[in-house]
Amino acid sequence: MASERMTVAKAMVKALTAEGVKTVFGYPGAAICPFYDELINSDIRHILVRHEANGGHAASGYARMTRKPAVAIATSGPGATNIITAIATAYMDSIPMVVITGQVSSEQIGRDVFQEADITGAAEPFVKHSYLVKNPAEVPVIFKNAFYIAGTGRPGPVLIDMPFDVQKAEIDFEYPETVDIRSYKPSVQGNKLQIKRAIAAIRNSKKPLICAGGGIFTAGAEKLLQQFMQLADIPVVNTMMGLSSVPADNPLYYGMIGMHGVKCANYAINHCDLLILLGARVGDRAVTAINRLDGITVIHIDVDPAEIGKNLAATIPVVGDVRYILQQLIEQAENYDHYDWRQELNTVKNQSEPKAAAKDGFVNPKEFIKRLAKKLPSDVIISADVGQNQIWTCNNIELKSGRLITSGGMGTMGYSVPAALGAKAASPMSEVIAICGDGSFQMQFMELATMIQHDIPVKIIVMSNNRLGMVREVQTNAYGNRLTAVFLDGSPDFIKLAESYGIPAKRVTDIKDADGAIDEMLGAKGCYLLEARVAEDEKTIL
Amino acid sequence: MKHTISILVENHAGVLARVAGLFARRGFNIDSLAVGVTEDEKVSRITIIADGTAYTLEQIEKQLNKLIDVIKVRHLPTEELLSRELVLIKVSCLPSQRAELISIAEIAKAKISDISVNTMTLELSDSVSRIKTFEELLRPYGIKETVRTGSIAMQKGGASMK
Ligand SMILES: Cc1ncc(C[n+]2csc(CCOP(=O)(O)OP(=O)(O)O)c2C)c(N)n1
């Protein structure tokens, strides 16, 4: 391919096109104008979000569907600092993303000029890598490397900070075909010996348990996981990030572990004799539920060696691509039978839960999510926010197919709606539903406009309790019920708010009306908002 | 426990900030840090002496390896360590004390780098512990200023990090 003379701005667009980028999420400003001036000449769809953080979250939702790096764009200074939360959120959950920010002109950097922010410095703790581009000629290689780094190994966000003058410089553009970064060679194949040891441990185990995390999705290994658990007859639990990697109706599936997990999943993890961590970093909120570790064998399979032994000591570490290692395990495993162990777990699973009730004028949140679950189409994508609504959703949605996404590591309120928007942009044929609280909804409802403007019909469920419910629960449990700064008085009427965007909306205050309202929501062609009124004293921890 | 960590990095702007930031974020205290270009001018070597438990050390090695600009990380074992630090010490020195200080310098294999009416500046390149002893010998004269480079280190014998 011969090189072609062009501006860097045009080269950036060419690079995105070469990377197969179809959609970007952004918010412009003067420092990124040269790029925008070229973007308009391309086939790339630009979705104008209403806040840069939401652009980042939308890219995250998009990337979680396509499993390729998604692109978010912001201008210099405040635009760049606004997107940091989204970068950090993506970093914690290993989401591949390339974030492009405008920067003041090179010769002005360091002088505190208008809208200057050291964004590569500020975002450093949260990026997989970053570039402050100084040499225009390096732009093609930087873009090539950025996409490669973001999308391979343990994925994560890569930031490219583009000074104004660099965007306007002219270069000979030729997009590299291959990548060669001497210091970055992620390992894919697990060590053969370690895999042998893992198999031996599985063979010797009477009570094995798989704990599957978000790495299953990264590796695209859902099918392989199901094949392996079925073959080796091993019960499975999920971390929050791993939810929906196994159909919830699979008899070997026992739910989510952790501080907010379900009883039988935590029972399983405390009674197994072999724990197989698959693409899970077992964050502290997941680990708190593990009381007993000595004497059990832990096989930890992860692409990131730094995760192994960080939160949980591993007896048998296996570093590599979960997909590849699962293939190896399937080849070497035999047909085991863990009938007694399953029976033991089933006894816990079948213990009856207290009957779900609710005060007059409210729906029981768990019951509501269960009803919703029954009606979901098979291709559904659920985007859960943070707070009580997240826990109710995670533990009751029980997806048999489709996908659940949420901000697991960072617990970023305001993630669900923009992430749903991004997911819908990537999978327009899927039903995409964001579920959030009335607190988090007010951190993100500006994106209703984005959905209308760009025709991205997402459904939204607001579980409103007029409280920052999760914090209220913490204050009730740990601060003698001294409630402070958790009241959401002054909130708007969400139905009227939705209608002002032209979005049909309905409020449910009685579980009797839930089915009808859910049907109406699912039947709606465009966006729809459903508010479910939840009593302020509902709990997540029983 | 003190650890000597030798890190080969791409000689790019900002790499030192990434490495130093990582240490700070992960709660690993840096005792000394020295940076310089290697035999390959595109590669720099950062030598860090740091304090921490075996767990933190393992984490720091793994996290350093995740930085894209880090080419190689080695924890240099104490037994095989060839380590040097350069120190400049300016001490008060009356003309009558010069002979004494010169003999201390000779014994310690230090150089006299500068002299003024009332001071003498000595220069020593040696191991951290011998530098400490040297400093103690000079202390009674009144140390006006000390400048140290931080340790640089390499593995003894034929092995190299590449
Ligand atoms: C950006 C951000 N700010 C603060 C928090 C702390 N926080 C966690 S849950 C929560 C309450 C969420 O309230 P709401 O969205 O109404 O949901 P609910 O818990 O009532 O379901 C808060 C404030 C957070 N996770 N993220």
Image: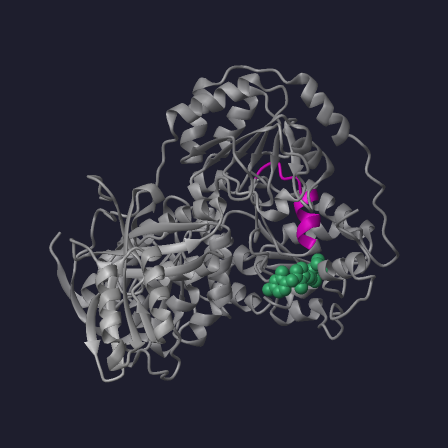
| Residue A322 part of the magenta-drawn span | no
Is A393 part of what is drawn in magenta?
A: yes
Percent across and percent down for residue A428 are: 49, 51
Residue at 25%, 74% in the rendered image: B121
Where's residue A218, x and y in %? 45, 42
Q: Position of residue A367 (x, y in %)?
A: 77, 46
Q: Is residue B77 visible?
A: no
Q: Which residue is drawn at the image coordinates 63% and 29% (left, top)?
A: A250
Front residue of this view, candidates A7 and B98? B98
**Residues shaded magenta:** A389-401
Depth check: give the residue in front, B8 or A274: B8
| As drawn, A231 above or below A538 | above
Whether residue B120 appears in this view of the structure is yes
Quadrant of residue B38 within the rendered picture = bottom left
Number of callouts: 0
Residue B120 against residue A498 in the figure, above or below: below
Q: Position of residue B126 (x, y in %)?
A: 27, 57
Is residue A217 found left or right of A505 in the rendered image?
left
Q: Quadrant of residue B145?
A: bottom left
The dominant secondary structure in magenta is helix
Ligand 1 image-quadrant field: bottom right
Q: How is the image coloured?
A: one colour
Seen in the image, is A320 located left or right of residue A108? Answer: right
Q: Nearer the viewer, residue A347 or A433?
A: A347
Residue nearest the viewer, comparing A74 with A435: A74
Compared to residue A40, the image places residue A69 above or below, namely above
Residue farthest along the right direction in this orientation: A360
Position of the C terminus of chain B by quadrant? top left
